[in-house]
Amino acid sequence: MVRALAVLLFIGMYMTGAVAMAHAASEKFVPHGRNGVRLSLPQGWHVGNQEQIDKIQSGMPRRGAMTPRMLFMAAAPDGALNVVVMEVPDVLTNGSTQDIEKWSEEDIAKVCAAVTGTQGVKKKETPCKRRRTGEQHALEMRHTVTTQGKKAENLTLLYNRGTQSLSLMFQYPPAKSRKLEPIIEKIIRSFQFDA
């Protein structure tokens, strides 16, 4: 997961350059979809095309059947907020997204401990909890990372999808957290995926 977060920071830098001439995002949200995932983003955002996704995917470390697969990536015109959706094999137990709703607090604690351990971040530094996101349920994790001397806030939502987990990741500067939270919440509420 640490590598995935480093990839997220790289994506933000890559895509910021790609949209240097873009206008500021408006309040209008536009639906986007790719590789079985759909979400709405503010108008004016750069959404990575399949060629860009494939290029970044080819640079990611390979771990055999456990290699995450990038499905979607996008960035705000100013690069302040980056969004990535990845398919991550076997992070959560097999089942539907609704299974998370039925988990006991003990189940949540066990899964959170296992998942946060894969991120290389201490559990007390990574709050992990169950969260309802519209019709779906997910595990939510937040923490701060430092990459290339810069701090970034990471919000990751893990959705259970059978034998795969979907990771909806956001990365943004801590100083812009308050401004970006309403945008992040709208994106989360719009997130859908094929079963």
Image (cartoon, rainbow, N blue to C red):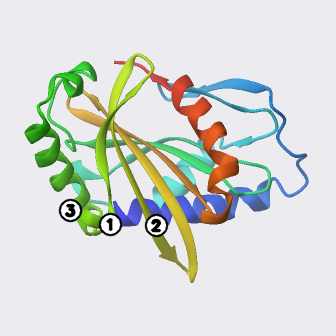
**In front: label 2 or label 3:** 2
Q: Residue at x 23, y 21 (%)?
A: 96
Labelled pair 2, 3 in contact (Cβ < 8 Å)? no
Name the spot of residue 123 as percent of width and height, x first: 24, 63
Q: Secondary structure at mark 1?
A: helix
> What separation in Å lies between label 2 and label 1 (alpha carbons)?
8 Å
**Where on the picture, by quarter, is residue 118?**
bottom left
Name the spot of residue 187 as percent of width and height, x first: 59, 32
Q: Residue at x 45, y 61 (%)?
A: 5
Instruction: Tell me the amino acid under the disc marked 3.
Output: Gly
> What separation in Å lies between label 3 and label 1 (alpha carbons)?
11 Å
> In the rendered view, does 83 fall on the left or right side of 161?
right
The residue that label 1 is drawn on is: 125
Q: In this orientation, which residue lies closer to the viewer: 107 or 168?
A: 107
Labelled pair 3, 1 in contact (Cβ < 8 Å)? no
- Image quarter where the N terminus lies is bottom left
**In front: label 3 or label 1:** 1
Going from N to C along the chain, the mark reached first, 2 or 1, is 1
Relative to residue 41, is residue 51 depicted above or below?
below
The residue that label 3 is drawn on is: 117
Name the spot of residue 120 as percent of width and height, x first: 27, 69
Assess disc 2: are there few (<14), some (14-19) or many (≥20) residues with their C-alpha within 10 Å of its C-alpha. Answer: some
Residue located farthest toward the bottom when viewing the structure as drawn: 149
Labelled pair 2, 1 in contact (Cβ < 8 Å)? yes
Q: Residue at x 73, y 25 (%)?
A: 30
> In the rendered view, does 152 fall on the left or right side of 91?
right
Q: Secondary structure at mark 2?
A: strand
Can residue 101 be seen here? The reply is yes
As drawn, the label of residue 144 is: 2
